[in-house]
């Protein structure tokens, strides 16, 4: 006779569920509350991004990239244009680089704010979410002022940006940063140092560094596991090598290295670093034109490029293949949330259903980017 | 290590596996597919190479009559060098060894490429479609892909060259 | 007390014991139901506004006098209630229909019965039992049967999880709550709520009112254990695990809609009222004035009782919008490994204290 085991129950979390951050279905094998296996089912949001890209021109791909990672659309644009410029071997005017970095970092703050707020919501704390959304709103207002859109910008174009910065943008942005920096401490007091929050996140869902690398987990999730890897520092693109900033890594602040709290905490610290970059960029931004003279139909030379950039969720890579025509031969997006989600099964085994929600929230996935 | 040194290291360990190709850039290398699992193990575990991160796995259809390709972007966290490995597959019967157990992210990447191109990764423990529904027909990202007429009674709209969407 | 008074009054008219009992019950029960409904209406509104102010929002603004121009959204709950009443009452095809329909009312009965023994003032109390405390604790447990029924009958895994968690939680937390409420019983030497409140007259050390909470250090701790356990028993954050919406969608309420769901809501707020009422009567001097000897006649009793009650309910709301949610095992850990030992020790301490100083 073997060990008597309780019958396993299959629980479907999603596709419609408050904490799946989109349309994701998790098939969870549970024994009571304890999870023994998770099978994620993707594709509910599949919009054939890669097939679409093969049927439109290079410029027309940019709005599609917006819709992949809709919480950090600027960074999605950024990755694509950086890859395109590497493929075409062109250099953009200096002002464009600065504007792109300002927008990218602002969007990183906005995305992290939402991630942290929603994480609080997953754990059960409502109030911090509203505080963070309030400040995110001000960033979106600045985007609206710049390019007219609040969520999907289509702002960065190959060889330039769609609009120059509006009047007094620098002043508004500095004003926002002065207001925003003290707020970080308020978030910490509201949520981070809350005993219950720490109890729920510390030691939960530990991703060891080697597992994280093997699963291709990147960005704050990888840095939460203690690996100092940031594409902005280690494979600098655009002009990130000109700025002074630290790469925060997890240090097992309240528990084990690589737990949910570390991933949360790395995001919080990254917001501070983004503020640092923004202040430097706003100080040094030169004048000039923001459009590079390019033919109406871009025809990159034959060849292929794989370029990754640091989006708020991790390494956002674009594999672009050109056959010399105005339409891409192949565009592949290596999405950071896709790889982050793949580790869920491995780290969630043996934890409770509540912890699965906590782990899923700490990975900060965006389903638009996973399903493409 | 530079790309040339990495290629030399592969060549010395597995002579004659590198396929010469004109159209590939310096950082790309085409390998023969029959020993791929051994070579991948070597690439990952050799202390001088130690490619511990599979950055990206891309399927490519080279054209109506050309072969299919899988492109592996490998990166080493330790040495901070990278290489892109290209493996060609026969169009009629595309298959190659799975590296899913070496780099765990290969699991989903290979499922995605299987889903889009129908390339079978032998040895993969869970070879299912990942983004398309399980009963979808055809391999959508192949250049000769013809969409289904209808799916579970839902008519799939087709694009006409002149009129746009039907 | 109301029931007894009415029956005495009926007895002066004629001798119909059964009829007069029924009449007295109905006459005092209907206002009680109104209190319950009104409480839910007000509490929902207050909860919305309190949460809004805590979250840096403005909360409901539209409904109210001069619709859509109203400043305070005073009629928001009325609009909600109307919406809930006209909503379709969905019953899942595969549910156990009889249990499914019955469950809300069993929960409701549990909450409603408890309310009958709450001493709103020295005269306003529907039934003045000699075992009032025991009665409230006892009927409070009826609700959990309704919750398990709702969870089981819904034939939904989320509901089942919610019901199981809820049953485990409520039964567990009844122990520290019960062990803590023993302390006022020991101090006052009675289970009768009115007598317990009378025991708390006067003052200690000349400044503080002679409430049981201020009587000695053990009672002070006991109050907090009781109150936190009470929050857990009413399934509110940080103990809202049974209906944790980010995990279990809505727990045992997942399949309910419309009026049946409204009954759950009504019961939840009534439960808050009952447990806060018990805490106020047992530890905070009931309807006694905080300044001994002043403002303690007539309607002041009701005023003080309601003020204390509302303050405790506000604290519960404050908890809800401040704290994250615990996990099931952490919740049980707090109950079995922290609260129960302390509560046991408290009983011992109070016994010693009474022996020495009493």
Image: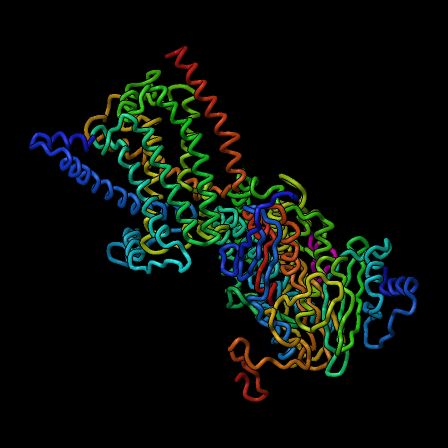
* Residue at image location 72% in from the left, 64% down from the top: B56
Q: What's the image's color scheme?
A: rainbow
Query: Is residue A297 visible from the viewing direction of this image?
Result: yes
Query: Is residue A178 visible from the viewing direction of this image?
Result: no
Q: Residue furthest bottom?
A: B162
Segment tinted magenta in the rendering: A230-245
A259 over A286 or under it: above or below:
above
* Residue at image location 43% in from the left, 44% down from the top: C321
Q: Residue furthest top?
A: C356
Q: Position of residue A84 (x, y in %)?
A: 69, 71
Determine whether, in the image, residue A195 is placed left or right of residue C262.
Answer: right
**Foreground residue, A368 or C138?**
C138
**Foreground residue, C138 or C184?**
C138
Q: Position of residue A38 (x, y in %)?
A: 61, 54
Question: Residue C226's image quarter?
Answer: top left
Determine whether, in the image, residue A258 is placed left or right of residue C56.
Answer: right
* Residue at image location 68% in from the left, 59% down from the top: A315
Q: Quadrant of the C terminus of chain A?
A: bottom right
* Residue at image location 87% in from the left, 55% down from the top: B48
**Foreground residue, A310 or C336?**
C336
Determine whether, in the image, residue C41 is placed left or right of residue A57.
Answer: left
Numbered marks: total: 0
Question: Residue C270's image quarter?
Answer: top left
Q: Quadrant of the N terminus of chain A?
A: top right
Q: Residue furthest left?
A: C13
A165 over C170 or under it: above or below:
below
A237 over C100 or under it: above or below:
below
A333 over A109 or under it: above or below:
below
Q: Position of residue C54 (x, y in %)?
A: 42, 45
- The question of residue A162 being in magenta is answered with no
């Amino acid at each position: 006779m073997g060990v008597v085991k309780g019958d396993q129950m299959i629980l479907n979390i999603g596709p419609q569920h408050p904490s799946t951050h989109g349309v994701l279905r998790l098939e969870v094998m549970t024994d009571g509350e304890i999870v023994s296996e998770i099978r994620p089912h993707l594709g509910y949001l599949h919009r054939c991004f890669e097939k679409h890209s093969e049927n439109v021109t290079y410029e027309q791909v940019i709005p599609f990239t917006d819709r992949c990672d809709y919480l950090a659309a600027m960074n999605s644009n950024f990755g694509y244009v950086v890859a395109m410029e590497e493929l075409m071997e062109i250099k953009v005017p200096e002002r464009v680089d600065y504007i792109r970095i300002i927008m990218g970092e602002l969007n990183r703050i906005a995305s992290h704010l939402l991630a942290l707020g929603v994480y609080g919501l997953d754990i059960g704390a409502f109030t911090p979410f509203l505080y963070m959304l309030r400040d995110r709103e001000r960033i979106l207002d600045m985007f609206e002022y710049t390019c007219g859109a609040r969520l999907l910008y289509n702002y960065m174009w190959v060889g330039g940006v769609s609009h120059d910065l509006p009047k007094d943008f620098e002043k508004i942005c500095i004003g926002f940063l002065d207001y925003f920096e003290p707020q970080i401490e308020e978030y910490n007091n509201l949520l981070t140092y809350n005993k219950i929050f720490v109890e729920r996140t510390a030691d939960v869902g530990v991703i060891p560094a080697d597992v994280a690398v093997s699963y291709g987990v990147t960005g704050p999730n990888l840095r939460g596991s203690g690996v100092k890897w940031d594409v902005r520092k280690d494979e600098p693109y655009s002009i990130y090598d000109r700025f002074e900033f630290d790469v925060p890594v997890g240090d097992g602040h309240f528990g084990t290295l690589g737990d949910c709290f570390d991933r949360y905490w790395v995001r919080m610290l990254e917001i501070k670093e983004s503020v640092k970059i923004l202040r430097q960029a706003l100080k040094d931004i030169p004048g000039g034109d923001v459009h590079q003279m390019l033919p109406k139909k871009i025809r990159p030379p034959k060849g292929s490029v794989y370029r990754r950039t640091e989006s708020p969720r991790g390494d956002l890579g674009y594999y672009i293949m050109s056959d010399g025509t105005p339409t891409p031969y192949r565009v592949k997006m290596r999405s950071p949330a896709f790889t982050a989600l793949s580790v869920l099964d491995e780290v969630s085994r043996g934890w409770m259903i509540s912890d699965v929600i906590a782990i899923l929230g700490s990975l900060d996935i965006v389903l638009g980017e996973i399903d493409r | 290590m530079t790309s040339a040194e990495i290629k030399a290291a592969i060549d010395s360990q597995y002579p004659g596996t590198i396929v010469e190709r004109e159209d590939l850039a310096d950082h790309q290398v085409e390998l023969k597919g029959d020993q791929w699992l051994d070579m991948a193990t070597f690439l990952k575990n050799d202390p001088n190479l130690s490619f511990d991160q599979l950055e990206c796995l891309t399927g490519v259809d080279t054209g109506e009559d050309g072969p299919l390709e899988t492109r592996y972007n490998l990166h080493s966290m330790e040495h901070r060098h990278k290489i892109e490995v290209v493996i060609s597959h026969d169009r009629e019967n595309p298959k190659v060894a799975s590296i899913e157990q070496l780099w765990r992210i290969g699991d989903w990447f290979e499922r995605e490429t299987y889903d889009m191109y129908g390339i079978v990764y032998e040895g993969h423990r869970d070879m299912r479609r990942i983004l398309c529904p399980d009963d979808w027909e055809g391999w959508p990202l192949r250049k000769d892909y013809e969409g289904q007429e209808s799916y579970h009674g839902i008519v799939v709209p087709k694009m006409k060259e002149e009129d746009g969407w039907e | 007390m109301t029931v007894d008074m009415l029956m005495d009054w009926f007895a002066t008219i004629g001798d119909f014991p059964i009829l007069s009992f029924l009449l007295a019950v109905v006459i005092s029960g209907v206002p009680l139901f109104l209190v319950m409904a009104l409480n839910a209406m007000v509490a929902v509104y207050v909860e919305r506004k309190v949460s809004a102010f805590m979250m840096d929002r403005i909360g409901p603004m539209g409904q109210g006098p001069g619709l859509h121009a109203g400043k305070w959204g005073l009629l928001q709950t009325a609009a909600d209630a109307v919406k809930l009443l006209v909503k379709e009452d969905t019953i899942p095809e595969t549910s156990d229909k009889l249990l499914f329909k019955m469950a809300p009312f069993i929960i409701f009965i549990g909450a409603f019965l408890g309310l009958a023994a709450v001493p709103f003032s020295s005269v306003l109390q529907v039934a003045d039992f000699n075992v009032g405390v025991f009665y409230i604790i006892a009927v409070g447990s009826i609700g959990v049967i309704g919750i398990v029924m709702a969870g089981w009958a819904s034939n939904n895994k989320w509901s089942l999880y919610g019901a199981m968690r809820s049953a485990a939680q409520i039964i567990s937390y009844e122990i520290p709550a019960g062990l803590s409420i023993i302390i006022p019983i020991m101090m006052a030497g009675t289970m009768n709520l009115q007598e317990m409140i009378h025991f708390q007259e006067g003052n200690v050390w000349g400044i503080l009112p002679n409430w049981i909470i201020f009587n000695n250090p053990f009672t002070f701790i006991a109050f907090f254990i009781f109150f936190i356990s009470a929050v857990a028993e009413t399934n509110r954050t940080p103990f809202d695990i049974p209906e944790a919406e980010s995990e279990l969608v809505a727990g045992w309420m997942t399949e309910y809609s419309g009026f049946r769901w409204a009954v759950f809501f009504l019961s939840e707020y009534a439960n808050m009222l009952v447990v806060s009422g018990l805490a106020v009567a047992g530890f905070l001097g009931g309807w006694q004035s905080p300044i001994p000897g002043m403002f303690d006649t007539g309607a002041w009793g009701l005023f003080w009782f309601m003020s204390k009650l509302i303050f405790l309910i506000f604290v519960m709301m404050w908890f809800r919008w401040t704290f994250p949610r615990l996990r099931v095992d952490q919740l049980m850990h707090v109950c079995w490994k922290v609260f129960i030992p302390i509560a046991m020790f408290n009983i011992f301490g109070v016994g010693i204290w009474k022996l020495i100083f009493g």
